[in-house]
Image (cartoon, helix red, strand yellow):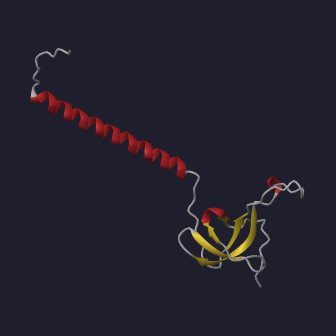
Amino acid sequence: MEVRGPKIRLDPSIGADRVKRLDALRNLVAKHIDRAHAKQKRLYDQGRKDVTFGVGDMVMQRTHPLSDGKKGFSAKMAEKFDGPFSVAEVLGPTTYRLDVGAKRTNPKVHVEHLKPPGPTCNLPLSQ
């Protein structure tokens, strides 16, 4: 059987002091979380660029090749981008429809898989 001692009454000001300290601790933790979030965002955004394309702009599309040992094809050595293709339609802020000609259907492509053609790209000459 457990023996209980007399109840100890605490001063109400002690409870109020604990609540104040708990609120201060919550504010400190929120400040540290906000600071960590801002730092992570800054580091993430460091290597990112906002790229937008308009209808008619020429873009290169990332390829997704798979290696095939039977055919002697190595995806590692394949071209990383295909194109250039013309942007046929802007579907949203990050999604585009490309005009790829008769090669295949016009795909919807996320901006992450597109890049502007480089200076070594063989663009058709305008006349």
124 versus 10 height, above or below: below
On the picture, is 31 further left or further right than 52?
A: left
94 and 51: which one is in front?
94
Q: Position of residue 57 (x, y in %)?
A: 65, 75
Measuring 76% from the left and 67% from the top, which residue is drawn there?
Answer: 82
Q: Position of residue 58 (x, y in %)?
A: 69, 74
Measuring 15% from the left and 33% from the top, which residue is drawn there?
Answer: 16
On the picture, is 14 further left or further right than 83?
A: left
Task: Say which quarter of the image contains residue 3.
Answer: top left
Residue most extreme to the bottom: 127
Q: Quadrant of the N terminus?
A: top left
Task: Say which quarter of the image contains residue 67.
Answer: bottom right
On the picture, is 8 further left or further right than 73?
A: left
Q: Position of residue 21 (x, y in %)?
A: 23, 32
Residue most extreme to the front: 1
124 versus 114 height, above or below: below
2 and 13: which one is in front?
2
Measuring 54% from the left and 49% from the top, which residue is drawn there?
Answer: 44
Q: Quadrant of the C terminus?
A: bottom right
